[in-house]
Image (cartoon, rainbow, N blue to C red):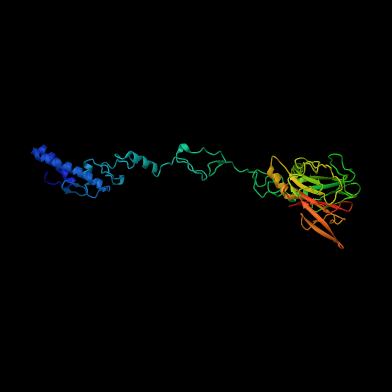
Amino acid sequence: MTGACPTAGGAVAAAGGARAESAGHGGSGARIIAAMRCAVRHAVAALGLAACAAGEVADRPVGSARVGAPDADAVADLGLVPLGRDDASRPPPRDAATARPDAAQPGRDAAVGEEDAATAPDAGLDAAPPVDGAAVPDDPDMQPPECPPGHARQPDGECAPPPDAACAPRAETCNGADDDCDGRVDEAPVCGPWAERACRVTLGWADNRRGPAGPSDTWSACPAMPRQMGGDVRCTTTLGDGRFAHLDLDGNVDENDQLAVAFRCEDPDFAALAEWAETHCAVFLGWADDNRGPAEAEAWGACPAQVAGDGLLRCTSSGYDGVFRALSLDGDVDENDDLAVAFVCRDDADPDRARAFQSGAAVHLAWSPLNQGPPDGAERWTPECPGEDVVRIGRIALPRRCVQSGGDGRFHRLDFALDIDEDDDLGIALKRR
């Protein structure tokens, strides 16, 4: 075919003129057909140029002619929508006054429409916002349930209950209360000072097996009196000041001698705490002949599984009830005999509290020969405990020895260095650690 169709607008005009000529002037059929073909060519060119505008091609040849950008009014007259054009470049509708700017546009790809809806600025406004920093899904159907009144959403999505209004957290102290509001009582090792002040350890001795025949609330004048140093049944008690109480022995210490211990607590301001300590903690004593005693041990014979036991490794204790139980010695007590001490606290319902109380206080047990122990009420028996010191009488060097329970619930051994008789001293103290 010869000749060119100059523009899409010209093609439209030519097609309109051909129709008019055919209707009004009866022009020849050849001219009409040529004009219609030209219009069709321009329509095809308009589609190609529209694709060009979307970036697919710069110019698209039609036949032997190259055409420029299509006329927007001409494209609109043909009802054509350029391919790839977004809404911003879409020709406005003819009736602009009644058109809705946000109305759905015809010809949009369905998938594109769904993507636009998902990323629209107002998408998801009906979804519940995150609560207290917790991440929540955008889908309203997947929102977590609302927290009960007063509860707060945590970063892990859980609802935390409101804090106990009656509990104001503070440093944990030894008072039988949950000071730091963690649901536990006296779980920190803070009870040493209270134990030193409010609790008492009484050490008893008897010759010729004159101590009580069975468990007893008293040993000689103790605990009604802090000490009693005369006769065959003697006792001494710590005074709540961390200092040593002195016990003088009498006669040759041998198989008819007895030892006993009691542990009691009293505090009118914290009566429940005192009762708990006395019924959940106990002081243990151990004895062994022929150097059989272990240096440090979880157990000494039957103790602490039992409150007392016989055999090669003998033991007794305050028994978690503050009662005296006599420990009978055997043979001549001399340089190959051992004593031991342990302080044990147990509470199956609150083991953390028991361990903390046990680690906060220590029972010290000491010995000196020839009445060379420090006076009653001494702050120290040796410079360090556990440890040893030497006292010199002229050219004679005499030992002083001390061990302590150590806060670990284990038995700690005290070695004698000489024969034990009427001029030997024992010492007992309850100290904070």
Q: Nearer the viewer, residue 53 or 420?
A: 420
**Residue at x-position 17% and y-position 43%:** 41
Q: Residue furthest right?
A: 231
Asked if residue 109 shows in the view, the reply is: yes
Q: Is 46 displayed left or right of 278 in the figure?
A: left
**Residue at x-position 18% and y-position 44%:** 42
Q: Nearer the viewer, residue 64 or 139?
A: 64
Q: How many marks?
A: 0
Asked if residue 25 shows in the view, the reply is: no
Instruction: Return the x and y of residue 381 as percentages of the image width and height.
Output: 81, 56
Instruction: Return the x and y of residue 59 as percentages of the image width and height.
Output: 22, 49
Q: Nearer the viewer, residue 117 or 358?
A: 358
Q: Residue furthest bottom?
A: 394
Q: Is 368 displayed left or right of 69 in the figure?
A: right
Quadrant assignment, res 40: top left
Instruction: Return the x and y of residue 19 as percentages of the image width and height.
Output: 13, 39
Q: Is 361 displayed left or right of 49 in the figure?
A: right
Instruction: Return the x and y of residue 18 as percentages of the image width and height.
Output: 12, 40
Q: Is 5 displayed left or right of 113 in the figure?
A: left
What quarter of the picture does the N terminus occupy?
top left
